[in-house]
Amino acid sequence: MGQKTNPIGARLGIIRGWESNWYGNKKDYATKLIEDNKIRTYLNARISKGGIARIIIERTLNKLIVTIHTSKPGIIIGKGGGEVDRIKEELKKLTGKEDVQINILEIRRPELDANIVGDTIARQIENRINYKRAIKMAIASALRMGAEGIKVKVSGRLGGAEIARSEEIKQGRTPLHTLRMDIDYASVFALTVYGKIGIKVWICKGEVLTKRDLNPNFVGGKSDVSDRRDRRDDRPERRDDRRGGGDRRNERRSGGGGGGRGGDRRR
């Protein structure tokens, strides 16, 4: 089942929060849902080069709060904040609401966000860069930033071939059935002269073993990747303590107690 369903939807309420937070009754639920879709479609088209990862929509009684998670906040803010004001006025016309608030949150490590990684690969394919090279560069960047695994699948007329096919490149581990694993997922497409090429990205950021704040706007504390790095740094010390021979091994490596060639070379 983990291979069939959306990894984000499968983890809602467990380690992921909802991207639309509001209450709707039977009368206006469908209206609000369609309005959310219009807002996201409009902002993604309006700021196509803004590096948007996700758009969080919250509603109170008479207020609409839109939070944009982006890797390029300067493009959205504009000079002196003029671009944000224009976007706010456009959203007021689109939704018909007077009280609209826009928040912008910067993504510190875009290499670990599936939407940004997929969009980067798509833009490179549109610029006629070899798709294998673009995917391998994205995989190397994600692993270098601390991801436990990444999988990228591309489908379509790859390289301009007449027959469409699918290719999958992966490195590390991406256990989709394990719901405590923090897996980010995105599905984007590249518009080329020979047709659309679909791109799917799965990025595994590690296990979530503690209770997580399900608010999607929550940004605080140390990330899971930094926690894992700290644990890795502690492993050699624990291993030496368990085996009880760390000092003797270090003496052998340094050539202690003898005048061998290895010791002279190190000096």
Image (cartoon, helix red, strand yellow):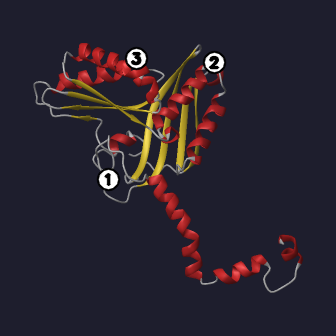
Looking at the rendered structure, the kind of residue marked 1 is Arg
In the image, residue 225 lies at what x, y percent?
48, 53
Q: CA distance from mark 3 to mark 2?
A: 33 Å
The first of marks 3 and 1 along the sequence is 3
Q: What secondary structure is found at the residue carrying circle 3?
A: helix
- Residue 155, quarter of the rendered image: top right
Q: Is residue 157 visible?
A: no
Q: Which residue occupies the foreground of this view, 17 or 158?
A: 17
Mark 1 sits on what residue? 212
Quadrant of the image for the C terminus?
bottom right
- Foreground mark, 3 or 2, reads 3
Q: CA distance from mark 3 to mark 1?
A: 33 Å
266 left or right, relative to 22: right
Q: Which residue occupies the foreground of this view, 75 or 33?
A: 75
Mark 2 sits on what residue? 162
Looking at the rendered structure, the kind of residue marked 2 is Glu
For the residues labelled 3 and 2, say whether their Cβ atoms are less than 8 Å apart: no
Mark 3 sits on what residue? 46
